[in-house]
Image (cartoon, rainbow, N blue to C red):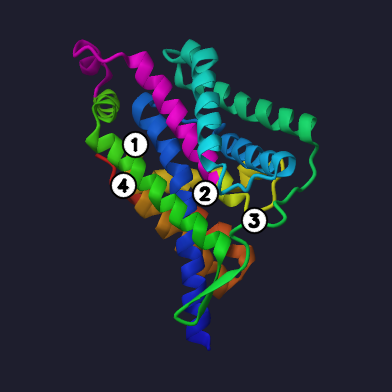
Amino acid sequence: MTSEIIIQTLASGLLIGLIYALIAIGLTLIFGVMDIVNFSHGEFLMLGMYSSFWLYAIYHLDPIYTLPLTAVLLFGVGAMVYRVVIKKIIDAPMLAQIFTTFGLMILFRGLAQFLWKPDFRTVGNSVVSGTVSLSGIQIGLPQLTAGVGAILVTLGIYLFLTKTRTGAALEATAADKEAARLMGIDSQRMFTLAWGVGAACAGVAGGLLSTFFPIFPEIGANFILTAFVVVNLGGFGSVVGALLAGILVGVIEVMGGFFLGPQYKMGIVLCLFLAVLMFRPQGLMGKV
């Protein structure tokens, strides 16, 4: 019985780790292309969750079915944020960039509290409600669906970056902005694309989470700190590193909470973060 519980806990860690990876991929993509740390990334997740909730509450559309619409909406939000705000501070000192994205975080959170109140909301009866049994292990169907969805979106992002001309242009911009510009690549278009895709990743993660996680204005703060740990562990700018690190962090967090107590799981993740900073600051897949 104990071994079954451990395996079930390990599966839960794997599934939540895939969600962490999806959130972190959007974050690391923005950093890799522009060298900007986006502190408002968690609020894109929050907007994705609210988008899914209101489509469900008003039009009775399940969050799973509205994932493409959520991705498009958040892509638009990300692109707009870049064009209206980030574009103006792209060449500013790093401190100005940090304060700008931090200010965006406060703005989005405040708007959510004003418009939708600080109440907890939930999607009552999704099409993926319930549990499934896999080899005798009970797994929540929403969590399993979210994990599979995260894998598919991550695979799509990876194929987009490695198999398309636009993805290659994005990778080239991330590698050397000046050289990419000399080769005729429109850097502003690439920056807009990076913010749009990054926000869409967070939005899809939010849509997947909305099927089993409460929705409230501060929800982004619950995930963004872990996302930064994942990005740092995987290596800033590495999509593959973010995927591997997300799974690793999810498993360590859940298993640590199981063996030591849930009150310690965030402390374990932060200790991992400090250890990476001390012994391998470039991360698992980052370049020296």
Q: Earlier in the sequence, mark 2 or mark 4?
A: 2
Query: Is disc 1 placed on a helix, strand or loop?
Result: loop
Q: Does the magenta segment cover residue 6?
A: no
Which label is found at residue 275?
Answer: none
Q: Is residue 216 above or below residue 258?
A: above
Q: Earlier in the sequence, mark 1 or mark 2?
A: 2
Cα separation between marks 4 and 1:
9 Å
Give the residue number, with chain letter if any, for mark 1.
237
Q: Is residue 210 visible?
A: yes
Give the residue number, with chain letter if any, for mark 4.
240
Is 179 left or right of 158, judged from the image as shown?
A: left
Pointer 1 local density, CA inside 10 Å: few below 14, some 14–19, many at least 20:
many
Give the residue number, with chain letter if any, for mark 2.
226
Q: Amino acid at mark 1?
A: Gly
**Front-lying residue, 271 or 207:** 207
- At horizontal 27% and vertical 19% (from top left) the residue drawn is 177
Q: Are marks 1 and 2 in contact (CB under 8 Å)?
A: no
Callout in the foreground (1, 3): 3
Cα separation between marks 2 and 3:
26 Å
Give the residue number, with chain letter if any, for mark 3.
126
The image position of residue 253, as x and y in percent, is 51, 62
Q: Earlier in the sequence, mark 2 or mark 3?
A: 3
Q: Earlier in the sequence, mark 1 or mark 3?
A: 3
The quarter holding residue 51 reads top right
Query: Is disc 4 placed on a helix, strand or loop?
Result: helix
Q: Amino acid at mark 3?
A: Ser
